[in-house]
Image (spheres, grey):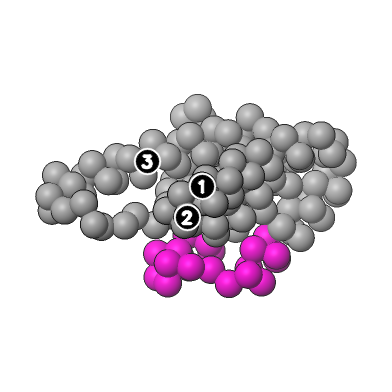
Amino acid sequence: MSQMFAGELIALAVSAVFALWDIKLRRAPLWLFAAGFLAGCIFAAAAKRALPAVLLSMIPGLLLLLLSVLTEGGIGTGDGLFYVSLAGFLSPRDSFLILFLSVFLAGLAALFLYMRKRERKTTIPFLAMVPASLLILLTGGM
């Protein structure tokens, strides 16, 4: 098993935990983000990932954090923190792909909900889209 595949599998497990938390409570505790980030750092060190690659993998999370500030919480800070915590497990390419796939899947879910309920006030737990995005990536869909 390659190290990147192992990282993607671990990222899938971590994202499933975050997704369940996001679906059920619409928030995750700070210790969970810290644990995910620490696990990512340990994995990156054990896999001997180059620091520039790990830093590049953090860009999607940092962009989400910036958007959270700019939208005054319209996009959750937790979403950005989560993507930063995944950086140790994923390549820069995979980090960006997961973000784009998650946004696409969230858009499809929003469209489905709008067509079904005709309501615009429904919120979608964004982190719930990440495990599905990782599964698409892992099964060779991208």
Upstream in sequence: badge 2 or badge 3? 2
Q: Is residue 22 magenta?
A: yes
Tell me where residue 126 appears, x and y as whole percent: 42, 52
Q: Main secondary structure of the magenta part?
A: helix
Question: Is residue 109 toward the left or the right of residue 22 in the image?
Answer: left
From the viewer's side, name the closer residue of 97 and 1. 97
Q: Are marks 3 and 1 in contact (CB under 8 Å)?
A: no
C-alpha span from label 3 to label 1? 23 Å
Relative to 14, 26 lies left or right: left
Position of residue 58 relative to residue 19, above or below, is above
Q: Would you name the residue on which mark 2 appears? A: 72
Residue matched to label 3: 105
The residue most toward the top is 142
Q: Is residue 10 visible?
A: no
How far across and how far down the image is residue 88, in percent? 73, 47
Is residue 76 rendered to the left or right of residue 115?
Answer: right
Q: Which residue in the protein does label 1 denote?
A: 70
Residue 26 pos. (x, y %) = 42, 67
Q: Secondary structure at mark 1?
A: helix
Say which residue appears at 45% left-offset and 42% top-offset: 102
Q: How many marks?
A: 3
Q: For numbered disc 3, what is the local secondary structure?
A: helix
Three-letter code, disc 1: Leu
Residue 109 at least partly seen: yes
Per the model, the C-alpha gap separating discs 2 and 3 is 23 Å
Above or below 126: residue 90: above
What residue lies at 58% left-to-right and 34% top-to-bottom?
96
Whether 44 is drawn above or below 92: the answer is below
Magenta stretch bounds: 17-36
